[in-house]
Amino acid sequence: MVKGFDAQAKSTSMSERVIPLVDQRLLALPAVLPVQPVLATGLLSDGLGRPLHDLRISVTDRCNFRCNYCMPKEVFNKDYAYMPHGDLLNFEEITRLAKVFVAHGVRKIRLTGGEPLLRKNLEILVAQLANIPTPDGSPLDLTLTTNGSLLARKAKALKEAGLNRVTVSLDGLDDTVFRAMNDVDFPVADVLDGIAAAKEAGLGRDTQGRLTGLKVNMVVKRTTNVDQILPMARHFRGSGITLRFIEYMDVGATNGWCMDEVLPSAELVQRIHAELPLVQLGHSAPGETAERWGFANAQGLHDPSLGEIGVISSVTQAFCRDCNRARLSTEGRLYLCLFASQGYDLRQLLRDPSQTDEVMAATIDAIWQGRSDQYSVLRSLRGPDTASGPGRRVEMSYIGG
Ligand code: SAM
Ligand code: SF4
Ligand code: SF4
């Protein structure tokens, strides 16, 4: 059977939508070999002058949730053919590539998926990545995005292996709303236990022991969980955990996205501000996608003990200008944008014994220099891209968020 969507090539019962026939994962761009090996200088920039700073590595295309905005049950059902294990990059291959990326300037690596904690022995990969030296001796920021379902069990081992911090996705505190959004009837309480375990294990604590890096992501859909915004803000205010609201995005081709479902971040900030006063804060790091808002005290000044929220306005305020992220898919394709339809096949190089790390470095150099992706900017100018067939975008569960 052909992998992925071919198995679902039919009109679905969820709507009039037709799931296209072509599986994007089959369409790889060849990684063209450079004429001459190039030394990585750490100063790489793309066609729009953007550096290479972040690498997101998807370690699995599987997930135990079926969030309707990401892996709708109607498509990712029991007939869906996930990638065979042999197609996945193994930990040594991932680490070898990560080293090359770090030599090129990457300082932040985020493990994602699918659900990354479903990948067996993930802490072994974490330990390997945590040991990668950076050319200037600055620490590598190693993090992971998870739905939290397995975090209570794994937080301690991940911290001990060298994971610095973690972002947990949670779309509401009301159990009925949350169970419906994850669509597998998973309870809120277990995710909250996972977050507590991460805190307890010291994930997200800086070298002075301050809790600065533990985050919770909430995707907001207008008709689904808008009533969860304030309860979530109240719950995490003063907890040391930063809550970030993400505008529902038109990633992939299966979630039936429409603009009416997007709650613009500006409106969301107003809703919170009306009850819990906020003040805008500056960006914490170059390429940081979240706009930061601090909870204010009675004088209208940010009170650090109350913490802050972040809003990620991927739809209403494109941030492509500063986008410094590369994405490595589960089977080793390099994607230059979350909305790309094709990735460059690096696995083919990894599995060719005649190819050295220098060749790999030069290949990545050439690919990054040729990058001009800015989908969100174009979306705001021309509207969403609704291509089907070969030009269709990859799914977020395949390249990670
Ligand atoms: N399974 C993990 C999780 O949920 O955290 C990691 C992978 S998930 C694809 C990464 C992030 O993407 C999550 O925070 C999720 O909420 C977000 N996401 C998925 N689909 C999205 C969409 N259509 N719009 C906005 N964010 C989305
Ligand atoms: Fe799974 Fe994460 Fe996608 Fe939800 S958002 S279906 S938890 S990969
Ligand atoms: Fe980066 Fe693509 Fe998102 Fe723009 S649309 S911010 S280029 S991932």
Image (cartoon, rainbow, N blue to C red):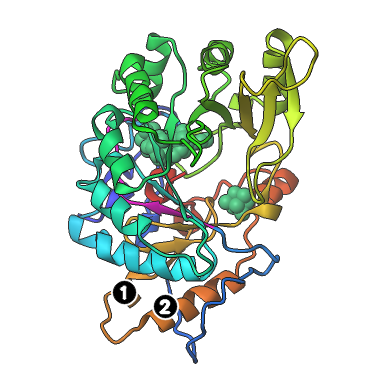
Q: Is residue 289 left or right of residue 82?
A: right
Residue situated in front as seen by the camera: 110 or 48:
110
Place of residue 200 in the rendered image (x, y in percent of width and height, measured from the top left): 35, 26
Which numbered tag is attached to residue 201?
Answer: none
Ligand 2 quarter of the rendering: top left
Instruction: Measuring from the top left, give residue 145's x and y in whole percent.
Output: 41, 39
Given residues 145 and 346, the one toward you in this image is 145
| 393 in relation to 183, above or below | below
Image quadrant in which you'd find residue 74: top left
On residue 350, which mark appears? Answer: 1
Q: Which residue is at the far front?
A: 208
Tell me if residue 121 comes above or below residue 237 in the rendering.
below
| Stretch of the chain drawn in magenta | 54-67
Identify the element where label 1 is drawn.
helix
Q: Position of residue 157 (x, y in %)?
A: 25, 40
Cβ atoms under marks 1 and 2 closer than 8 Å: yes
Does residue 174 belong to the magenta stretch?
no
Amino acid under label 2?
Met
Q: Residues within 10 Å of mark 1 (few under 14, many from 20)?
A: some
**Numbered badge on residue 360:** 2
- Write down the quadrant of residue 347 in the picture: bottom left
x 33%, y 84%: residue: 355
Q: Name the element at disc 2.
A: helix
